[in-house]
Image (spheres, rainbow, N blue to C red):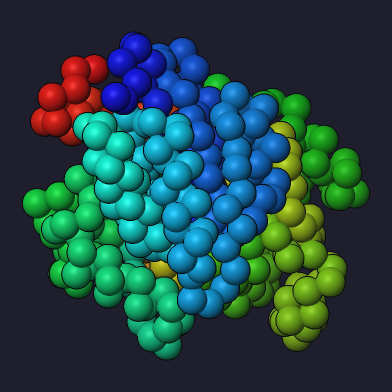
Amino acid sequence: MPNRANEMKIVHIISGLGLGGAETLLLNLVSESRSTGGTHVIISLSSLDIMAERLRAAGAEVRLLGMRPGIPNPLLLIRLARWIVKANPDVVQTWMYHADIFGGVAALLARLMFRLRGQRHRFVLVWGIHRTEVPTAKVGRVLNALARIGAMTSNQLPDSVICCANASYKTHAEYGYDRSRMRVIHNGFDVRKFVPDATARATLLNSLGLPPRSILIGIVGRSNPAKDYDNFLRAAALLHQRVPECHFVMVGKDVDANNKALARMMSELGLTRVCHLLGARNDLHRIMPAFDMLCLSSRTEGLPTVVGEAMACSVPCVVTDVGDTGQLVGDTGLVVPPRDPVSLSDALEEMATLSLEQREKLGKLARERIVECFSITVCWQKYRDMYATLLRAKGVTR
């Protein structure tokens, strides 16, 4: 029988545990659930990375299945099913396409194992979609195949499908996912960790050797076509000609001095002196409050974690209108079309030329919006309420 105590036991199956938006949300949900009841087993299909240590520190059990690229090993699927049976969870929550399909098959096997033992299973299976655009074969044949399988089986395998944004819901429903099982739960942000810090700006200026009059424009994201650093740098080049005191602080995996493509583009655009590449950082909560504004230049997103975290730090944002980013920012920042460096540059200039008091007012409104509408507390309660509703439908009271 499933766990009957007040605590809800959840097995999470995720593709990997690198530093990304979905992985950060998982960590935040695990941490938040400490106060409201929830035990977590995290199973990574492919690898353990930086998030594994953080999840363990938050109290979760973390396991590695060890799948490799290519056709999945049936023995590993059986092992995953046995792990589910051993955990005897209330909920199996999968994260992203690989985990949705492989975890869905393993959950099916686990239910069969329960029946063969003469036991009645009652756990619910919930898929998680954390991207807006359905991947085409051009983007990746494996991802495209998994999305197609997901659409075909979404009315059979999962009890529910969570989308992180309304835009994700729309594109996947149009692709063929079962609308009756889909619902939107926006990502939540840690408003206790990401807070305003009046000393952060001076600290970062000092570490970069910049004068106090500098305007710090931050961008946070791994080096990836979806983040569209080309768009950002072209906008930065236009802005630099008009507001030369702007400096561009770039943070993310592979966004460092070893990235030859970025270095070449910065040199060609005359930005080398005003771009500061910090690479991957584990102290974003200390860096974010130093920015005068955050820029998101992406060509695709769901609900971007970095924007919510910046807003929680009272940093106003200039973002591209992708996924639900515009809904997240509301009237606390500026929203422009994607892949349009001229519009992006104009919006950055508009924000940069506001008075300090005006930017601080926008930042204060941004934090209030996150706390009221997008905090991790609100997000976890929505997950927990949804799980309880699904379990009640199977005769399990929570």
Residue at x-position 42% and y-position 88%: 138
In the image, taking residue 27 as reference, residue 329 lies left or right, namely left
Residue at x-position 61% and y-position 26%: 58
Residue at x-position 50% and y-position 51%: 79
Could you tell me if residue 18 is visible in this image? no
Residue 83 x, y percent position in the rendering: 48, 42
Residue 42 x, y percent position in the rendering: 52, 40
In the image, taking residue 197 as reference, residue 96 lies left or right, namely left
As drawn, 312 above or below 34? below
Direction front: furthest residue:
117
Residue at x-position 46% and y-position 13%: 35
Residue nearer the viewer, 238 or 228: 228
Residue 21 x, y percent position in the rendering: 51, 50
Count of marks overlaid on the render: 0
Could you tell me if residue 209 is visible in this image? yes
Quadrant placement of the C terminus:
top left
In the image, taking residue 146 as reference, residue 307 lies left or right, namely right
Quadrant placement of the N terminus:
top left
As drawn, 106 above or below 259? above
Residue 166 x, y percent position in the rendering: 24, 53
In the image, taking residue 311 as reference, residue 293 lies left or right, namely right
